[in-house]
Amino acid sequence: MVKEVAPDIFRISQNKRTWFAPFSVNVFVIAGDNGLVFDAGMGGRASGEYMVACIRDIEERMRQKGKPCRITRLLISHGHWDHFSGADYLRETLGLTVIANEPMLNSIRSRKDYRQSFRRETAVIDTPSPWVARKARDGFHLFLDTLFFLAFKVRFVKGPVETVKDRDELDIGGERWEIRMMPGHCDDDMVLVNRERGILLCGDIVLRSVNTWLGPPRSNLARYMKTLDDLAEIEGLKLILPAHGSPVTEPYLRLREAVEHRKKRTLEVLRMIRDSGDQGTRFENMFKAIYPSLKMKERMIARGWILLTLMDLLERKLIRAEVVKGKKVFFGVE
């Protein structure tokens, strides 16, 4: 489905239902001379053909307005699968120039590096284990990852990529759009802002009705909080276009809400650990107390922010961790 969400800016909604889970993502097209696609969306031939049809429809709509339009470029907001998987198909089919930043290159090009980055997420709660147990766990994770890649048709970017850096500018239809590196949600996040129009394309950094996914090792809580502050300092914002859900029409209010939510969640985890006293508490106990009845899919999503919060609290020396009877236990620090 294509919708014009601001003058000459179109949202393409990609929706996918698999046996694993339903999923949706927004791809934005800034139409005009030397136009740009913001994010590549999901992989697979069907998704690619849908995207091509939508982009051609957008070009035709612009011509009917009497405006020149040729989409020539694709900018990837960050190195998560649902933002880069469609890149090679669009490059090969439409001849688009694919644009990313240097930190993205490993995660968008290599299945091995992509897998390993997410399988390091439990380091904060892992304890030493026998070789046989590690190999069994690695094999199980490989099986799960393979199922996931197949279900969502994850595709890595093998073709040429043009790199950009912080504060580079792009001319799109005679308008100036500024690239800003805003890591935190992911270690390679970048946004695109038109200061004259007050429009921000932000990927997953802030969403309208839910809170974005966060989890180690590619998220950093302190850096994410700084990014929210940095976005709030951009003057004149009127509209945020996120990669999931509907547009954010009150940008500064939503950014404040996101900051307060993260502060509240961090305090919740810290209090839980401090209230455990000399006995301490384990990750599993905290997770069950916060989410007593989540299904498997929701558990996979929700656990990341607790792990990330534990890492942040350990770095700030507000808590400490010990291995007790083979399990990682967390204690408050006075």
Image: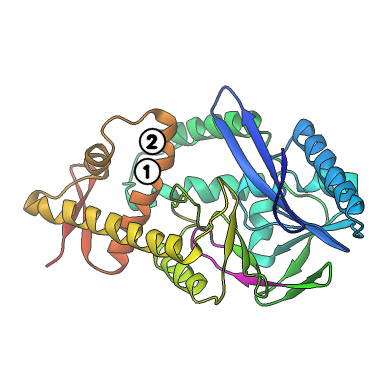
Q: Is residue 193 magenta?
A: no
Give the position of the C terminus as an image quadrant: bottom left
Which residue does the image show at 44% across and 52% down from the upper left?
Answer: 214
Rendering coords of residue 199 (x, y %): 63, 65
Specify whether 207 is left or right of 282: right
**In the picture provided, is 131 more to the left or to the right than 322?**
right
Residue 188 in view, yes or no = no
Please tell me whether mark 1 sits on a helix, a strand or a loop: helix
Q: Name the residue at 53% across, 65% down.
A: 183
Three-letter code, disc 2: Arg
Q: Is residue 329 left or right of residue 31?
A: left
Question: Dots 1 and 2: beta carbons under 8 Å?
Answer: yes
- The image quadrant of residue 225 is bottom left
Q: Neighbour class for label 2 at 10 Å: few (<14), some, many (≥20)? A: few
Q: Residues within 10 Å of mark 1 (few under 14, many from 20)?
A: some
Q: Which residues are magenta?
A: 177-188
The three-letter amino acid code for the residue at tag 1 is: Arg
The quarter of the picture where residue 143 lies is top right
Q: Which residue is mark 2?
A: 299
Q: Which residue is mark 1?
A: 303
Residue at 46% from the left image edge and 49% from the top image edge: 213
Q: Using the image as rendered, state which of residue 27 and residue 160 is in the foreground.
A: 27
Residue extending farthest top: 19
Occupied quadrant, residue 137: top left
Q: Quadrant of the N terminus?
A: top right
